[in-house]
Image: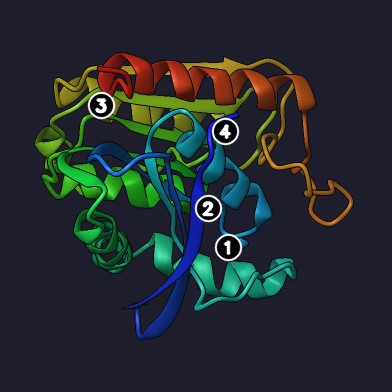
């Protein structure tokens, strides 16, 4: 296994001191980089491990924070913070840009080769960076199929991959249809994978459907979605020369 190094990084965003997780591949050369956004509950070991896995593949990876170092395991507290955030594209962009600035200023990062991958709220933030015209090589969003302000998707300059569970009541068929219509109308190179039988947050091992209806882990589809994300990166942002 390739030796990687990790460290926490503190930075300001959304009026909070965010605590991200930076993972660096072996070596000293500049590498392509991935911004990794968490579900609405916030940064956890799940995303930290994903950042580490990306570093093992040769990427600089920053798993960014949403809640100032807190993990909001209580559904009501999470919704109270995330719902206003998801209704405010400028706030989402502010959180995304702050993390992107940290990633870009890391000496190992090639600032011209960056992708954004996100889950739930983190995926919505990745999309908003694209709608803001950020030069990204790829965007991947799982569960975060949030539509943007009219016309702004035309600013997306890279392929967009989206994944969702067929039984996800939060990203229901109408929401999926609105998202894909937005991407199509904007001329985006997009694709959508619907994972049969999966609920919301199906990729996240710690979720428990008894906490909130419609939420649950699906091990096989979690592995498939991860492979699909890695395949997208290999296509649009190869880590090998």
Whether label 1 touches label 2, CB < 8 Å: yes
Picture quadrant of residue 218: top right
Looking at the image, which residue sits at the far right? 210
Q: Which residue is mark 3?
A: 183
Whether label 2 touches label 4, CB < 8 Å: no
Say which of 212 and 136 sits in front.
Answer: 136
The CA span between labels 2 and 4 is: 20 Å
Disc 4 crowd, CA 10 A, few/some/many (<14, 14-19, 20+): some
Taking the spot 67% from the left edge, 39% from the top edge, the residue there is: 200
Please tell me which of labels 2 and 4 falls first in the chain: 2
What is the number of the mark on residue 172?
A: 4
| Helix, strand or loop status at disc 3 | helix
Please tell me which of labels 1 and 4 falls first in the chain: 1
x, y percent for residue 186: 15, 27
Whether label 3 touches label 2, CB < 8 Å: no
Picture quadrant of residue 58: top left
Coloring scheme used:
rainbow
Say which of 101 and 209 sits in front.
Answer: 101
Taking the spot 14% from the left edge, 46% from the top edge, the residue there is: 134
């Amino acid at each position: 296994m390739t030796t990687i190094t990790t460290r926490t990084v503190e930075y300001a965003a959304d009026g909070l001191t965010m605590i991200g997780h930076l993972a660096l591949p072996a070596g000293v050369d500049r590498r392509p980089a991935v911004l990794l956004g968490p579900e609405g509950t916030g940064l956890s070991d799940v995303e930290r491990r994903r950042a580490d896995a990306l570093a093992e593949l040769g990427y600089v990876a920053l798993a960014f924070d949403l809640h100032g170092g807190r993990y909001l395991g209580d559904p009501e507290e999470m919704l109270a913070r995330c719902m206003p955030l998801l209704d405010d594209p400028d706030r989402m962009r502010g959180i995304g840009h702050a993390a992107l600035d940290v990633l870009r200023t890391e000496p190992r990062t090639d600032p011209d080769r960056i992708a954004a991958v996100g889950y739930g709220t983190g995926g919505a933030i990745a999309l908003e960076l694209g709608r803001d015209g950020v030069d990204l090589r790829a965007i991947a969003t799982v569960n975060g199929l949030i539509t943007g302000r009219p016309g702004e998707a035309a600013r997306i300059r890279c392929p967009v991959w989206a994944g969702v569970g067929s039984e996800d009541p939060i990203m229901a068929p109408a929401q999926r249809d609105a998202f894909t219509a937005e991407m199509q109308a904007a001329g985006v190179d997009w694709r959508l994978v619907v994972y049969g039988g999966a609920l919301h947050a199906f990729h996240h091992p710690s979720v428990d459907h008894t906490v909130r209806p419609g939420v649950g882990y699906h091990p096989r589809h979690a592995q498939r979605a991860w492979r699909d994300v890695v395949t997208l990166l290999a296509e649009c942002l190869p880590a090998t020369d």
